[in-house]
Image (spheres, rainbow, N blue to C red):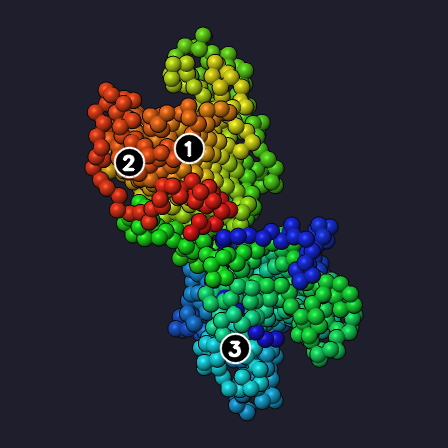
Amino acid sequence: MMRWMGLAAFWAASLHLGAWAQDTARPLLTPVAAADYTVSTYLAQGPSPWTPVEPSALRGLRPDFVVAADGSGTHSSLQAALDAVPSAGVESRRFVIGLAAGIYRGQVCLQTKAPVALVGLGSKPADARVVASRYAGERKRPGVDVGNPCMPAANAPAYGTFSSATLAIFSNDVQVSNLTIENDAMNGVRAGVGYPTDAAEAGGAQAVALMTQGDKIQLEGVHILGHQDTLYVRAAPGKAGDRVYVHQTLVSGDVDFIFGAGTLVIDDSTILSRAGRRTPGEGGYVLAPSTASQTPRGILVHNSRFISEAGVGVGSIALGRAWDQGIAKGAWQKSTSPNGQAVVRDSVLGAHLGPWAASTARRPFSASGDQANRLWEWNNHQVGAGDVAGQSPDWSRETLAPNDGWAAAKGGTLGGSDAGLEHTYTVRNRAELVAALAPRAFPRIVRVVGRIDLSTDANGRALGFADYRDPAFDPQAFLAAYDPAVWGKAPPSGPQEEARKRSVRRQAAQVVVKVPSRTTLVGVGADAAIVHGTLFLDSVDNVIIRNIHFSDAYDYFPAWDPKDNASGEWNSEYDNITLRAATHVWIDHCTFDDGSRPDEAEPVLLGRRVQRHDGLLDITQQSNWVTVSWNHFHHHDKTTLVGSSDSQALDDGKLKVTFHHNWYEHTRERTPRVRYGEVHVYNNLFEGGTEGPYPYGYSLGIGHQSRIYSDRNAWLTPPAVPTSQLLRGLKGHRFVDNGSTHNGLAADLLAELRVAQPAVNWVGDVGWKPSLFLAMDSVADVPARVRAGAGAGRGKAD
């Protein structure tokens, strides 16, 4: 088994493999077959079905033995602690071994013991490390070196692959959590430099980190690190049911680094292809199953992320190949030779990955015929290669560029870019999103795959009015009680209003999701979406949100305010994204709209049309240092507030926001409406019409104590919309614009304000001048560039 590759290209383009036509090098399961290749069906392959324990059950276990290198525990070596566990059959209870923080060098064997839980006692997997440095071609000292005690190579001149293992688990019912298992024998090798002579001559660079041969082995939150042959899952002779379940774990390597004949499930984990041992672009393999031909299931990778280190070429790593174990080139025989089986499904595949490859016995890869392979995919998302030097940007770790608007101030906006791989999540539904965004004090990256509906229950069932309604709330009784002809102008109160508020709280508890500090939330591919709810950034710092379509934050229980305007108004509760006291926020390449339930389709009740949607993006209550760039806001009424109220005096000196290269298409007003803030608006495109459900009202609302500085924005409207309508004075009196146009003609926006509102003492000085901005486009180029590049799924318009 040989070859290799690399944290390169990620989010610009996406291929949804579940929708591909059959590719002979990328065969897909049929929908019927996909239902038979699941986590539960793989784990049922054995003496009896197996359900691994919940990760929470492994936390807080009280150790029977503690291993500490400084001698403060019951044992100073892991092998000594394992040797102290009774043999299988002597005891049936589980023995817990705690591994204190530290580095434990040496090869370790757990063999035929009572059930064991091996738990790192540090705060993260890297704190407790089990490390060895043996590799297959390494020459042994006669009579001294043996190799791993579970598979010793006592009489062999070199260690060989199997005996190189750092940790071997040859025992049943074992749990391992929160530690690192590493073989660092090849760590110093870089593109041929430092390569061991014996390994080079013998082709023996295989260096196993973890080798298993046993049933019901579970790994939770473990780092398994190596290069070639990192994770080896064996099946005992004549026994195909040796099952291993790997969850929320990092596995790294370069060649055939996940391999073997056992039954292996890798779930919600990160698989890292490493660079360095060969020249850039030279290939490698990820999976290498050697499943017996009569065994239906071998390796399953589910809901996981395949990423690579920098320097790994696009398309240079094969997703895998069959390991025809023990079969010479050209000698493979159907039914008697191994025929490795693997399925990769519901996962994110980096641009470094290419198709399946020919087997180790040089059996050509084929999905049919006498030599057919058993390697398939289903419902994966592959990140495209982009168009710049063969690579695309890894948006998940990208930070805001220096000078890119107000969010670049005071240290800039990093989001969760420095998240560890154990805090990098891929989410596909509400439950996974909420779990990934749970309030904990570490940076995180959350990758959104597909459409996430926030208004769904744990089983994915859509929730609606009947699910959220308080039993006492009666819509008809509400209308009768607060009819202006009966109730008048007083704020609603009483049983029906209280029941409505309880209904609101029930809906909000479901559809409002809080985003913690130091988070990057990024959509994978062109179809990532979050619908029917609100992302709430409340008193947080450093958040990046990119490449997601936000739609239809629908309020089933809007409030009636009889004092809002002359005849009263319905007011809804939910924005697609709400910022309150949030700082250092970058919202980029997202799309915002009302979805398939526009307010225009709602009935007129109490004399006013019911409003189900509030803002698309609101930035309020001392939020500061925000950049909103390359987004598409469309078909909506009241789009964005910067500042919620004239009475919010604490907003003075805050609300520093930059809007650039955004596309406002058929948005009636508030793009944005500003109070207090120092807001830079440049290179945006505003398109409106006089017909349809969202007739143009105005774009920039100049509110109380606002200081808007406008540069090179383009407005395109029907001729019936005068230039004076582009702006609206709303108790503000300061405004600056440079170089903006209306229907291709230069527009003196300040002069238009003075004509439209002569009673206001308009001042062409806002008391500040932007210093944080990228190179501005010519205003003539704005419409084409913004249309081409703004919104989710568009990539960059560089």
Residue 737, labelled with which disc? 2
Which callout, 3 or 1, points at the residue further toward the start of the chain?
Answer: 3
Residue 716, labelled with which disc? 1
- Residue position marked by numbered label 3 in the rendering: 107
Q: Position of residue 769 (x, y in %)?
A: 23, 42
Give the amino acid at mark 1: Leu
The secondary element bearing badge 3 is classed as loop
The crowd level at tag 3 (other Cα within 10 Å; few <14, some 14-19, many 20+) is: many
Looking at the image, which residue is at 47% across and 73% down? 276
The secondary element bearing badge 2 is classed as strand
Which callout, 2 or 3, points at the residue further toward the start of the chain?
Answer: 3
The secondary element bearing badge 1 is classed as strand
Residue lying furthest front: 745
Total numbered badges shown on the rendered structure: 3
Q: Within the image, what quadrant is residue 581 found in?
A: top left
Looking at the image, which residue is at 53% across and 45% down? 528
Q: CA distance from mark 3 to mark 1?
A: 71 Å
Q: Within the image, what quadrant is residue 652 found in?
A: top left
Q: Is residue 101 above or below residue 61?
A: below
Tell me if label 3 and label 1 are in contact, CB under 8 Å: no
Question: Which of the two residues, 183 or 607, is positioned nearer the viewer here?
Answer: 607
Question: Which of the two residues, 396 or 669, is positioned nearer the viewer here?
Answer: 669
Looking at the image, which residue is at 71% across and 80% down? 328
Residue 412, labelled with which disc? none
The crowd level at tag 1 (other Cα within 10 Å; few <14, some 14-19, many 20+) is: some
Q: Position of residue 244 (x, y in %)?
A: 62, 63
Give the amino acid at mark 3: Gln
Q: CA distance from mark 2 to mark 3?
A: 70 Å
Between circles 2 and 3, the one closer to the viewer is 2
Give the amino acid at mark 2: Asp
Tell me if label 2 and label 3 are in contact, CB under 8 Å: no
Which callout, 2 or 1, points at the residue further toward the start of the chain?
Answer: 1
